[in-house]
Amino acid sequence: MGKKLHNKTDKRVLKKQMLDDPDNRVTLSFYQYANIGNVRVFRDHLYIAWESLGVMGRTYVASEGINAQISVPEKNWGAFKAQMDSITFLKGIRLNIAIQDDGKSFYKLIIRIKNKILADGLNDDTFDVTNGGQHLSAKEFNSLAEQPDTIIVDMRNHYESEVGHFQNAITPDVETFRDSLPIIEDQLQEHKEKNIIMYCTGGIRCEKASAWYKHKGFKNVFQLDGGIIEYTRQVKNSDLENKFIGKNFVFDERMGERISKEIISNCYQCDVASDRHSNCTNLACHRLIIQCESCADKWQGACCETCYQYLQLPEGTQKELRKGIKDSMKTYHKSRTSPFLENKALQEKVKVLFSELEK
């Protein structure tokens, strides 16, 4: 029998194993655009190698390259680095190591084959994807950001920028990178001659976006090298001014890394200052919200009264009501709503069942 190349163990078991594991781990991310001939062979080779090293996390591979957010056992760091260096286009690649890390960021290894490593909606054949904006170090970013003819653009989504962003940055109210591209282009139409600095979490979105905007006629396009993660590292190591306020949203179990002491967002339910992201504990909803600890206790992690009522129903009833709801169990249901909250008939049914339960 061939080696299993997927982990199908119950996630609750995997999460407990992760939390109970005494070994220290390193959380990191990286990406690389490269021409991969046989994506399936590369994917399986990577899975076998990383599973043997205890690597966990989420990785996408495509014919255009790789995009990874993973954690590695500290004891296997040397072997992991050697394995990475054995792959020609990954040798010596910069690894964006987490700023705040207790090693409990991922609980299983997932490597998926995608059409693209980043869903951007662009036809790469229509422009030079390698002709990106000039990379800026943290020091260069700070200097250029202070010039009056500079515009800073956040290439991330609303749920990321709402808890943290650079001072004076444009923060588009979007839910996907694909959505942001035409909106930002429209917002910047009158500023094609100005310095445009783009930034994102680790740099991958800016690689493609900066090339696209240069193709669309913007003259002075720059990108923050290594994104917010590398910027924060350089700021700390070189004692530079930190121009990022709040928290950096990350796509793992931690959901955020504290960059500055300011809390710039509010709890969705009581409006108190909070930047604590969590998913609604109603598994039929699971949408991403900002919820303070007090409201989390009061509502048992539910995002609204209807979801709270759902949680009071017997588990069997909850499971029955979840049938047929699509996408309810995405790791991050980032939309402002969810299939559950859009289903008015289902919500009414929950209210009726809850009322009967209280009698």
Image: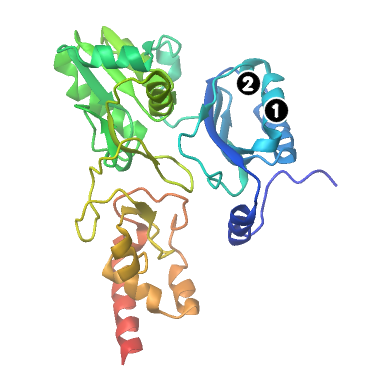
Q: Are marks 1 and 2 in contact (CB under 8 Å)?
A: no
Question: Quick check: can you spot residue 69?
Answer: no
- Residue 91 sits in quarter: top right
Please name the residue shown 31% across and 36% down the image. 260
Image coordinates for residue 211, horizontal then vertical, percent: 37, 14
Please name the residue shown 14% across and 15% down the image. 190
Distance from the alpha carbon under mark 1 to that under mark 2: 25 Å
- Residue 36 — which label? 2
Question: Quick check: can you spot residue 11?
Answer: yes
Image coordinates for residue 309, horizontal then vertical, percent: 33, 75
Q: Amino acid at mark 2?
A: Ile
Which quarter of the rendered picture does the C terminus lie within? bottom left
Against 88, residue 358 (above or below) is below
Name the residue furthest front: 239
Please name the residue shown 60% across and 41% down the image. 25
Q: Amino acid at mark 1?
A: Gly
Against 142, residue 167 (above or below) is below
**Which residue is denoted by mark 1 in the rendering?**
78
- Residue 180 sits in quarter: top left
Q: Describe the element under mark 2 as helix, strand or loop.
A: loop
- Residue 237 — which label? none
